[in-house]
Image (spheres, rainbow, N blue to C red):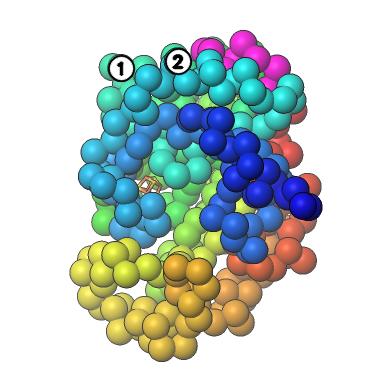
Amino acid sequence: MNLTWCNLNRVVGSNYRVIRPFDPWSSPLCTCPPKYSFSPYTGCAHGCLYCYVDYINQFEKPRPKKELLKWVEHDLGLIKKGSIISISNSSDPYQPQELLEKNFRRALEIISQYPLKILIVTKSDMVLRDLDILKKVRCAVTVTITTLKEDLARKLEPFAPSPNSRLMAIKELTKNGIRCGVRIDPIIPYLNEGEVEEIVKEVKRMGALHVVSSTYKAKKKNLLRMIEAFPEISRKLEDLYLLHGKKIGNSFFMEENRRRELMETIRIVCKSEGITFSTCREGFPELRDSQSCDGSHLVP
Ligand code: SF4
């Protein structure tokens, strides 16, 4: 058998408990390098309308994984030196209770004792709390920013930290020598597509080195939430996704030309700002200007 990263996960994946080989549901559109994925929490309190992982029961009530620290230690014993751990791909590691309970911080303290690379993916400026640890390890941070408009962010990501606090986090991380990328993800037609130039310029000003972007993919639950929150564009979204779009896996994508146009627009701005660019799960590998799509290459 030809062992790819994904089927390697299926063969040995059952040995892992909380830090697992990353397997993006075998998506042929995923261009991520081999890496491990760690989500300290099940569920997420940020409440993003476009969330793709809300199929989990009581998703909006995050809880730490059971016996988190014990299984972190266990899994770290299985992971090869120098591997990348991406934290996290399916919920934010900085949940509200993290402030008091410090579940992730304790896990990070353990991980930091191993010769591994860490890529943090977050929407939260709470990442700055862990600067003392991050400065001692090989790590990079990607911060997700979908809009700079506070009013749009309040509707789209009601309980997530504000766009301005995320920009400040990038600035502070960069000032402390932590390399940062930004996820402009998702780009939602009629909502934030007109802001991309401004976002790229602003994150560059804060010190970000890389942008990875992806268009909104419609699933039944997230589309219903979007339609309810933004009735003025509901018809247009339905036309774009359900009438003219294409179903790939479990999601509806916009037509390829429309997606490509959006991604090319951001790429051009990134080029003119001197910042690298990649798409995420769009199927346009030729639009990638960086060693990795997800920002793994930022980890020193
Ligand atoms: S931060 Fe991510 S996981 Fe959390 S609600 Fe938003 S999209 Fe979902």
- 109 and 250: which one is in front? 250
Residue that label 2 marks: 70
Marks 2, 1: nearer the viewer? 2
**Residue 57 visible in this rendered orientation of the protein:** yes
Q: Quadrant of residue 225?
A: bottom left
- In the rendered structure, does residue 12 fall within the stretch colored magenta? no
Residue at 50% from the left image edge and 81% from the top image edge: 246
- 193 and 107: which one is in front? 107
The disc label shown at residue 101, or none? 1
Amino acid tagged 2: Lys
The disc label shown at residue 186, or none? none
Amino acid tagged 1: Glu
SS for dot 2: helix
Q: Which residues are magenta?
A: 108-117
Report whether 261 appears left or right of 122.
Answer: right
SS for dot 1: helix
Where is residue 27 drawn, in percent x and y?
59, 60
From what the image shows, is residue 181 above or below residue 73?
A: below
From what the image shows, is residue 151 above or below residue 191?
A: above
Report whether 143 appears left or right of 176.
Answer: left
Q: Quadrant of residue 85?
A: top right
Residue at 77% from the left image edge and 56% from the top image edge: 289
Q: Are marks 2 and 1 in contact (CB under 8 Å)?
A: no
Q: Quadrant of the C terminus?
A: top right
Q: Residues within 10 Å of mark 1 (few under 14, many from 20)?
A: few
Residue at 37% from the left image edge and 28% from the top image edge: 65
Q: Residues within 10 Å of mark 2 (few under 14, many from 20)?
A: few
